[in-house]
Image (cartoon, rainbow, N blue to C red):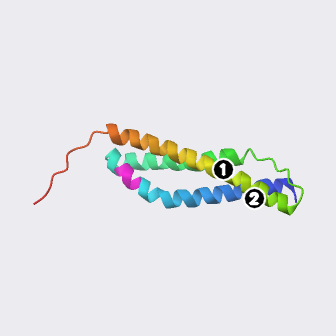
Amino acid sequence: MNTILLFFIQAALTLGIAFLLVGYFRPHLHKVLIDLCGTEERARFWTAFSNILLISMPMILALNYQPEARNTEEFFFEVAGKLSGNLAGFLFALIAVGLIISFFALVAPRSPKVESK
């Protein structure tokens, strides 16, 4: 198989998986960020920042791939191994976003909630 095609296949798979994971995670993150940031505009900025980080980290790792497989079986396991590394990059970025949000959740000033009767 052509090594350039193999490169594009693993990059496309990485990008697709990253977009699916970000799409699943985004609404939940946005709700937390609205609560922490206090305004919709700030929450949108930090949501966009997080999305960029969560997609770019695995893609940076994906762009470092140099196929060495000689046949289809080797290609399959080589791409599977590379995808696991790329998804580890996604998890690393997700942990970084979580730590940043946790830090701001601890130090962010909040107005006391008034109970309505």
Comes first in the chain, label 2 or label 1: 2
Give the x, y percent position of residue 36. Answer: 34, 46
In reply to whether residue 32 is colored magenta, the answer given is: yes
Crowd rating for badge 1 (residues with CA inside 10 Å; few <14, some 14–19, many 20+): many
In the rendered image, the residue lying farthest to the right is: 70
Question: What residue do we see at 19% from left, 50% from top?
Answer: 113
Q: Split into 4 quadrants, where in the image is the C terminus?
A: bottom left
10 sits to left or right of 102:
right
Q: Which residue is mark 2?
A: 9
Q: CA distance from mark 2 to mark 1?
A: 13 Å
Identify residue type, mark 2. Ile
- Disc 2, disc 1: CB below 8 Å? no
Give the x, y percent position of residue 72. Answer: 85, 62
Q: Nearer the viewer, mark 2 or mark 1?
A: 1
Give the x, y percent position of residue 11. Answer: 71, 54
Question: What residue do we see at 74% from left, 44% from top?
Answer: 64
Q: Is residue 25 above or below residue 39?
A: below
Give the x, y percent position of residue 43. Answer: 39, 48
Crowd rating for badge 2 (residues with CA inside 10 Å; few <14, some 14–19, many 20+): few
Q: Quadrant of residue 100?
A: top left
Badge 2 marks a residue whose secondary structure is helix
Q: Which residue is mark 1?
A: 86
Q: Is residue 53 visible?
A: no
User: Of helix, strand and loop, which mostly describes the magenta segment?
Assistant: helix
Question: What residue do we see at 37% from left, 52% from top?
Answer: 32
73 sits to left or right of 60:
right
Identify residue type, mark 1. Asn
Badge 1 marks a residue whose secondary structure is helix
Q: Which residues are magenta?
A: 30-34
